[in-house]
């Protein structure tokens, strides 16, 4: 037998439980952070898009359906 210290491979480290838990937690943390960034980006993008579409309206767009809620015979004396 040799007297040199043996280095564990990654499979043996995970079996021993030394670094595997820490690296797994690190992967989960980075994945969660990435998902948060993606969700925030999608939300902000949709908000900016909806606000940009709303600003393109003209004043006439607000009143385009103003008379549809009333009956057409109202006030005509029929």
Image (cartoon, rainbow, N blue to C red):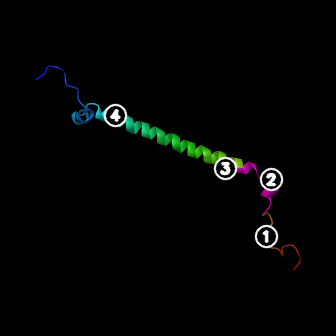
Residue under the image location 65 percent in, 45 percent down: 48
Is 23 in front, or is 73?
Answer: 23
* Residue at point 48%, 42% (across, down): 35
Vertical order, 41 against 26 (above or below): below
**What x and y, as percent, mark residue 67?**
81, 66
Find the distance from the CA under tag 3 to the CA under tag 2: 15 Å
Q: Which residue is mark 3?
A: 50
Q: Is residue 50 magenta?
A: no
- The vertical placement of 8 against 42, above or below, is above
State which mark lies toward you, 4 or 3. Answer: 4
Question: Circle 4 sits on which residue?
Answer: 23
Q: Locate residue 51 relative to residue 41 in the image: left or right.
A: right
Circle 3: is it few (<14), some (14-19), or many (20+) Cα within 10 Å? Answer: few
Residue at 17% in and 20% down: 4
Q: CA distance from mark 2 to mark 1?
A: 23 Å
User: If you read the primary sequence from the N terminus, does the residue marked by circle 1 or circle 4 appear first?
Assistant: 4
SS type, badge 4 = helix
In which quarter of the view is residue 23 placed? top left
């Amino acid at each position: 037998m040799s007297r040199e210290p043996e280095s564990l491979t990654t499979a043996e480290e995970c079996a021993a439980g030394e670094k595997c838990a820490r690296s797994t937690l690190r992967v989960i943390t980075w994945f969660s952070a990435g998902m948060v960034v993606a969700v925030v980006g999608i939300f902000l993008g949709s908000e900016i898009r909806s606000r940009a579409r709303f600003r393109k309206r003209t004043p006439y767009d607000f009143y385009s359906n103003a008379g549809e809620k009333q009956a057409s015979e109202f006030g005509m004396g029929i």
